Image: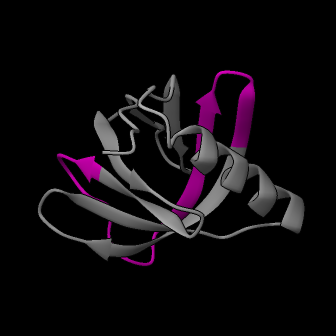
Amino acid sequence: MQGGSCSEISIEGMRVELGDPFAPGSSGTVSLNYESLSMAVPVSVVRSDLTGNGLRFVYDSEEQRDAVARLVTCLASPLPCTSLVLRRSRPELRLPALLSSN
C-alpha cells in the first residue's frame, strides 16, 4: 500500500499526490466515499510527475458520471471526503482523503 492524497477533483478526473507515482497508461478503480455517497469509478493515468498522477475518469455509464457530478458538487463545500481508495489488479493503494475546494 502507498499513502497519498487527492488535491483536485472534477467531473473529468482528479490529481492524486503520491510518493511513488504510477506510469501513464496505467489503469485501475478509484473508490470515492463522502457522507452517504459511495462509488467506484474506473480511471486511467494520463499524467505522471515526481509528486503524483493525473487520473481521467473512464465512466461505465451516464449514471456513474452523474454520481461523480453529485460528489464534486458536495465537495464544493469545505468538508473533506471521508476516504479514497485506488484499487489495481496488483496491491491496493489506499489514499487518505484530503479532497477540498481549495
The residue drawn where x is 58% and y is 49% is: 72
Q: Is residue 65 left or right of residue 99?
A: right
**In which quadrant of the rendered image does the C terminus lie?**
top left
Across and down, in percent, residue 64 comes to 80, 57
The residue drawn where x is 74% and y is 67% is: 59
Report whether residue 10 is seen: yes
Q: Which contiguous range is marked in magenta?
A: 17-39
In the displayed structure, 62 sits above or below 34; it is below
Report whether residue 61 is seen: no
Q: Is residue 44 left or right of residue 19?
A: right
Q: How many marks overall?
A: 0
The residue drawn where x is 56% and y is 70% is: 12
Across and down, in percent, residue 96 comes to 37, 28
Residue nearest the observer in this picture, 98 or 45? 98
The residue drawn where x is 25% and y is 49% is: 17
> Residue 57: within the magenta?
no
Given the current orientation, which residue lies at the most extreme front position?
A: 77
Q: Answer with the quarter of the image where residue 62 lies.
A: bottom right
> Residue 26: within the magenta?
yes
**In which quadrant of the rendered image does the N terminus lie?**
top left
